[in-house]
């Protein structure tokens, strides 16, 4: 039985100019102990789909799916309070901006212990011990000391480690990592990726890796889903994706990597296919529009 | 990444077309706030009434009906349909006085806001842009002004300048001005280090150009909200000064002054006190509701999706 | 024949971190004596991780901030903005493109005005001529005249970066500082912008200083590479030298950490995983 199974997921946002479809009919499933990468550029709906699973979308979003089952339980049929018991305990998520994901008012230790109190009902001493154990697990040096640090006293890499500690605190069955290393330096990225994959193997979690970086995919994933503009373009295991990409889009993405450059020019996606014509492109995505 | 995705969702779904598009989007967020729409309707009605006061008012505001001193409102016993809201102690029609009073209140609000906004923006931009001793000097003066209870300070200023509507407006403008200066300074400081400002600097823009053309237009949203809220504040303070006898002088039909001259009749003829008070309340409430609506529409943090 | 456009000798930049009421002020050495030179039409890439001083160096080269010590030559002329200020002529020679395409355009300025502004400030070009020049530049960077009257929020990240490049080129600079110009862009858009930069370099004989943390991009675009680590240039040489034979241990760490997206390394990883 798959750990997470999603059939025909559609997410639309209610905007000033009518509904906008961010995810259009995505099917997805992940087995226990598997690393699945979801790749796409901005606007591909890769984060939105996972936020829908977590129930973290704003209330202007409409989520529809034929089935969205975690461990055999259909998440869409649960009451909000039942769902909260699963989300954060059996499924947990880490985000792109490690420093912004931690509450600046509380120490790292407090934030780890908060999860333990809420989901595991441990007493004070148990929580303390477990927090130290978790800090060790994610590779933070002198954990007793660090428990009392505030987020602004730590580097981005350390903050992301704390986020991972919080995420794995309740031994989740599924960990969703949304661009976990995009905001980090390359050398730190390597450490965090190794840590995530190491923890995944050690505890037999399912790991969903949302990323736009083909290098990250190549270094971590077992299986890959490529998304573009809210639709699934391709699904394949990692080796065949890189060896023999089936869809034009994947092929274009791979050839746009600077290290794959042939001669002086990089092939671009619009050189190859369906990128809208220049005039249409102008009226098109205005990302992060200034309000 | 998520933020970006959703923002893109919004942006790409909106049809293009410059200003009109921006207005449509603005109205979409503004109209979600029912209170703000009601406030806008009431305020528009008020403005229309003030503009067309001579046409709308049944009588002249200064005309005294000697046969009807302290006549009650029309629906009360002894009321006359000629004086819908009754008359005051010297027989002037309340409704007409209130209608003409709207002119004064709106005028006061407008003048005060224009004064305090202009001076506040100038000081705030200078302080936020140059920092250092300019900043310290300006902001400490603002702090001193803010340290006094505003009404008391206005009262002192009017006492120095001499009572009268114009001096009262000046005093209120001075009292409200630090809020604008602080707000502008904060916004300028936030914008100053944005990359587009540095780009303009690299293009060779002078200090004046950077301040006025590059930075200031991007600081206007919070200032507009503050201006709206100050508008109602100004009306309220002007009424208070009028009530204390140092604002508009009788027989000017200003709402605060009307309240002051009528307070001895508060038990005998409650309507002469109630209606000016209600007029102030409704106006201030309407404008504050508009301010809240504007804040919702401008503030990206509150914007959903 | 090669002409040196940019030369820096022992550039130092210190920041004084203002002490609070109870803390003494201290000095942070952001750049510790870096030397470099770039020939006309070439690209120098400055690589490093956050906090290594590469952006500080970029601001010094762009004449935004003065260096604390050291000498900077542009087109053979010594520049010291702390002492002499900055002439309009010098201003025109160096321009910059920033990383964040969303922050680098004034949201209340139409594209036409964005492009016209440098000319308006620095030259006496009449309005209609400015308009023509802006239109031409729009075409050069792959946009069209229909974009002239639009506001920045109507453009995608890649298009905004094109506009930022166009603005930088309006004054015909000889040196363009590119501060992580493609880091915030999607892969496909990144490729387009890199191609555009290469084309423009050929056409105008531009000299680039390309700041980046992405080694694969650097390998693609650079002629010379300088690796910075805590304010020092730990490695400086031609691209092929640096990539083929990194000397400093930090450079080696950096290369090893860069994720590899080729079939061989995936196979190696999967084999290792199976064995474990």
Image (spheres, coloured by chain):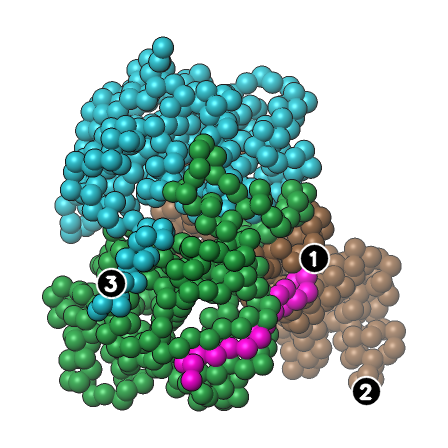
Chain colours: A green, B brown, C cyan
Q: Residue at x 71, y 48 (%)?
A: B17
Q: Residue at x 15, y 49 (%)?
A: C23
Residue B126: image location, x then y, percent: 44, 38
Q: Residue at x 36, y 73 (%)?
A: A34
User: Dot 1: what SS?
Assistant: helix
Cα gap from disc 2 to disc 1, whole angstroms: 51 Å
| Quarter of the picture holding the N terminus of chain A | bottom left
User: Magenta part mainly helix, strand or loop?
Assistant: strand
User: Dot 2: what SS?
Assistant: loop
Residue C32: image location, x then y, percent: 18, 33
Image position of A130 with respect to B296: above or below: below
In the current view of this chain or complex, which residue is farthest to the top?
A: C1
Report if residue C16 lies within the magenta region: no
Asked if badge 1 and badge 3 are on a common chain, one would say: no
Residue pointed to by mark 1? B24
Q: Residue at x 26, y 77 (%)?
A: A203
Q: Nearer the viewer, residue B236 or B303?
A: B303
**Disc 2 chain ID:** B
Residue C15: image location, x then y, percent: 23, 37
Cα gap from disc 3 to disc 2, whole angstroms: 98 Å
Asked if badge 3 and badge 2 are on a common chain, one would say: no
Residue pointed to by mark 2? B77
Report if residue A11 lies within the magenta region: yes
User: Dot 3: what SS?
Assistant: helix
Start and end of the magenta stretch?
A1-21
- Mark in front: 2 vs 1: 1
CA neighbours of label 1 inside 10 A, class few (<14), some (14 to 19), many (20+): some
**Disc 1 chain ID:** B
Cα gap from disc 1 to disc 3, whole angstroms: 58 Å
Residue pointed to by mark 3? C272
Hey, which quadrant is residue B26 in on the image? bottom right
């Amino acid at each position: 039985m798959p750990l997470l199974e999603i059939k025909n997921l559609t997410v639309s946002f209610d905007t000033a100019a009518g509904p906008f479809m961010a995810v259009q009919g995505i099917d997805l499933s992940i087995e226990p102990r598997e690393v699945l990468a979801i790749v796409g550029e901005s606007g591909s709906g890769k984060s939105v789909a996972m936020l829908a699973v977590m129930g973290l979308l704003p209330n202007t979003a409409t989520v529809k799916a034929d089935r969205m089952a975690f461990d055999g339980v259909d998440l869409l049929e649960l009451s909000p309070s039942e769902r909260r018991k699963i989300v954060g305990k059996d499924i947990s998520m880490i985000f792109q901006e490690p420093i912004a994901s931690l509450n600046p008012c509380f120490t790292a230790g407090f934030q780890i212990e908060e999860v333990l109190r809420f989901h595991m009902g441990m007493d004070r001493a148990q929580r303390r011990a477990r927090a130290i154990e978790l800090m060790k697990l994610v590779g933070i040096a002198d954990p007793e000391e660090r428990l009392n640090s505030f987020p602004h006293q730590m580097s981005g890499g350390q903050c992301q480690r704390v986020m991972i500690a919080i995420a794995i605190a309740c031994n989740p069955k599924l960990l969703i990592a949304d661009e976990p290393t995009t905001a980090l330096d390359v050398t730190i990225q390597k450490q965090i990726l190794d840590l995530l994959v190491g923890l995944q193997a050690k505890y037999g979690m399912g790991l969903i890796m949302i990323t736009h970086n083909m290098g990250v995919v190549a270094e971590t994933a077992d299986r890959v889903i490529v998304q573009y503009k809210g639709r699934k373009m391709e699904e394949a295991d990692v080796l065949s994706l890189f060896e023999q990409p089936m869809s034009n889009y994947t092929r274009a993405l791979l050839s746009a990597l600077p290290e794959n450059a042939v001669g002086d020019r990089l092939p671009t996606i619009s050189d190859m296919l369906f990128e809208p014509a220049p005039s249409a492109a102008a009226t098109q995505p205005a990302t992060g529009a200034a309000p | 990444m998520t933020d970006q995705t959703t923002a893109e969702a919004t942006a790409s779904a909106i049809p293009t077309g410059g200003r009109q598009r921006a207005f449509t989007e603005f109205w979409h967020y503004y109209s979600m706030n029912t209170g703000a729409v009601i406030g806008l309707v009431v305020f528009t009605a008020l403005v229309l009434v003030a503009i067309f006061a001579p046409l709308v008012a049944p009588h002249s505001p200064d005309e005294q009906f000697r046969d009807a001193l302290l006549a009650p409102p029309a629906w009360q016993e002894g009321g006359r349909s000629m004086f819908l809201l009754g008359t005051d102690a010297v027989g002037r029609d309340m409704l007409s006085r209130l209608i003409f009073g709207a002119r004064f209140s709106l005028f006061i609000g407008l003048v005060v806001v224009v004064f305090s906004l202009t001076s506040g923006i100038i000081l705030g931009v200078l302080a936020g842009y140059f920092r250092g001793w300019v900043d310290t000097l300006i902001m400490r003066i603002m702090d001193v002004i803010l340290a006094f209870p505003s009404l008391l300070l206005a009262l002192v200023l009017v006492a120095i300048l001499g009572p009268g509507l114009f001096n009262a407006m000046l005093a209120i403008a001075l009292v409200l001005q630090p809020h604008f200066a602080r707000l502008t300074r904060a916004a300028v400081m936030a914008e100053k280090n944005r990359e587009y400002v540095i780009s303009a600097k690299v293009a060779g823009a002078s200090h004046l150009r950077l301040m006025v053309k590059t930075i200031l237009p991007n600081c206007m949203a919070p200032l507009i909200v503050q201006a709206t809220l100050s508008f109602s504040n100004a009306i309220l303070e002007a009424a208070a000064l009028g009530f204390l006898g140092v604002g508009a002088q009788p027989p000017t039909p200003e709402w605060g002054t009307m309240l002051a001259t009528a307070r001895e009749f508060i038990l005998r003829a409650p309507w002469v006190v109630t209606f000016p008070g209600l007029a102030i309340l409704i106006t201030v409430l309407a404008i504050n509701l508009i301010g809240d609506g504007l804040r919702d529409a401008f503030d990206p943090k509150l914007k959903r999706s | 024949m090669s002409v040196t456009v940019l030369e820096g000798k022992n550039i130092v930049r210190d920041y004084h971190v203002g002490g609070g009421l109870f803390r003494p002020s201290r000095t942070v050495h952001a750049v510790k004596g870096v030397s470099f030179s770039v020939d006309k039409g070439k690209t120098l890439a400055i690589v490093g991780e956050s906090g290594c001083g590469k952006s500080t160096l970029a601001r010094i080269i762009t004449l935004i901030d003065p260096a604390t010590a050291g000498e900077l030559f542009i087109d053979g002329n010594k520049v010291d903005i702390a002492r002499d200020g900055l002439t309009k002529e010098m201003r025109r020679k160096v321009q910059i493109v920033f990383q964040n395409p969303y922050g680098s355009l004034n949201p209340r300025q139409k594209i036409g005005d964005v492009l016209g502004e440098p000319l308006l400030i620095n030259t006496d070009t009449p309005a209609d001529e400015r308009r023509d020049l802006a239109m031409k530049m729009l075409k050069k960077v792959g946009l069209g005249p229909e974009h002239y009257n639009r506001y920045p929020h109507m453009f995608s990240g890649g298009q905004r970066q094109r506009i930022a490049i166009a603005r930088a080129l309006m004054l015909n600079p000889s040196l363009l500082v590119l501060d992580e110009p493609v880091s915030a862009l999607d892969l496909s858009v990144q490729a387009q912008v890199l191609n555009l930069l290469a084309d423009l370099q050929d056409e105008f004989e531009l000299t680039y200083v390309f700041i980046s943390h992405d080694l694969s991009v650097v390998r693609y675009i650079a002629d010379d590479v300088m690796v910075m680590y805590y304010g020092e240039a730990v490695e400086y040489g031609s691209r092929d030298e640096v990539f083929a034979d990194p000397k400093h241990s930090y450079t080696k760490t950096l290369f090893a950490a860069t994720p590899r997206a080729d079939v061989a390394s995936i196979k190696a990883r999967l084999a290792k995983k199976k064995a474990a």
